[in-house]
Amino acid sequence: MSLASNPPNYEPIARLQNEFKNKDEFISEGILPYLEQILFPYLSKEARILDLGCGCGYLVQQLHLKGYQMTGLDASEGVLRYARTNAPESEFILSDIRKFELPATFDAIVSIDVLLFILNNEDLTAVFRNVYAALQDNGLFVFSIPLIELMHKYVEQGYLNHINVNDECAFIELFYYKPEQRMWKIEVTGFELVEKTWKRSDTTWLRKDHFLTDVQSALENVGFTEISHFKAGEETGNACFVCRKRL
């Protein structure tokens, strides 16, 4: 089965995701300030929120602590095992974001640093259609996605490689750009200290830079309105989108 037809494989590195990705400091400094401006003012105190591609559940827990009724959805059972520990009072669903079907019960859906792994417009539209169906009327959808219009300097200067290390784990992501496809091949290597022995895991991911017009058209085609976007921070090629399910 091709990488292009499957979500990234987190199973070999679930522990490393839990150790290094989207921890509380990143959420409090890099995500919550945006949500406090563009989402929280429009929600009731006990609104229902779905975190799409929730990973190890750190954002789910932070939003739960603010009083929201939280559900997380992810395609990796490995990371969901950590999520259920990190956010024990919230609900979690194992599903591919392109294929999930949920009733229209959510006041808002958020998806942070997930849609970069959607590799074509057909799948992007499928995700947006699923989100639209799961939102209540007037519900809000907030998500981040890399745009080709914002990525040029990162392509030229190679800012995207990541190395994370602590006493028991190391996590390396090396990015290789394919300009003809607007695609990044990410070679991922992890090391974990298990019973005094270092265990190595390797996997490969693909991520895509999208055109602004393609994202907007896909949102409009499934029915979203009041679509707006802005650059998500100075040190990123991501855009943050906000849109609403029409009444």
Image (spheres, helix red, strand yellow):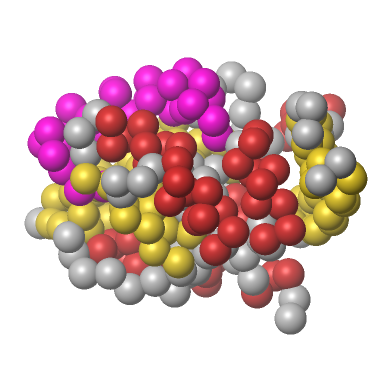
Q: Which quadrant of the figure contains the N terminus?
A: bottom right
- The answer to if 32 sits in the magenta stretch is yes
Which x, y percent locates residue 124? 50, 63
Taking depth in this image into account, of 200 and 126 the one nearest to the observer is 200
- In the image, residue 20 above or below residue 15: above
* Residue shown at the point (59%, 59%) measured from the top left: 78
- In the image, residue 68 above or below residue 124: above
Give the main secondary structure of the magenta stretch.
Answer: helix
* Residue shown at the point (21%, 45%) measured from the top left: 69
Q: Quadrant of residue 47?
A: top left
Which x, y percent locates residue 168? 78, 34
Q: Quadrant of residue 94?
A: bottom left
Q: Is residue 161 left or right of residue 207?
A: right
- In the image, residue 144 above or below residue 247: above
Which x, y percent locates residue 222? 32, 66
Q: Specify whether residue 65 is in view.
A: yes
Which x, y percent locates residue 191? 84, 44
Q: Which residues are magenta?
A: 22-49
- In the image, residue 21 above or below residue 11: above
Q: Across the whole image, how many numbered discs are drawn on residues?
A: 0
Taking depth in this image into account, of 113 and 234 the one nearest to the observer is 113
* Residue shown at the point (14%, 50%) measured from the top left: 138
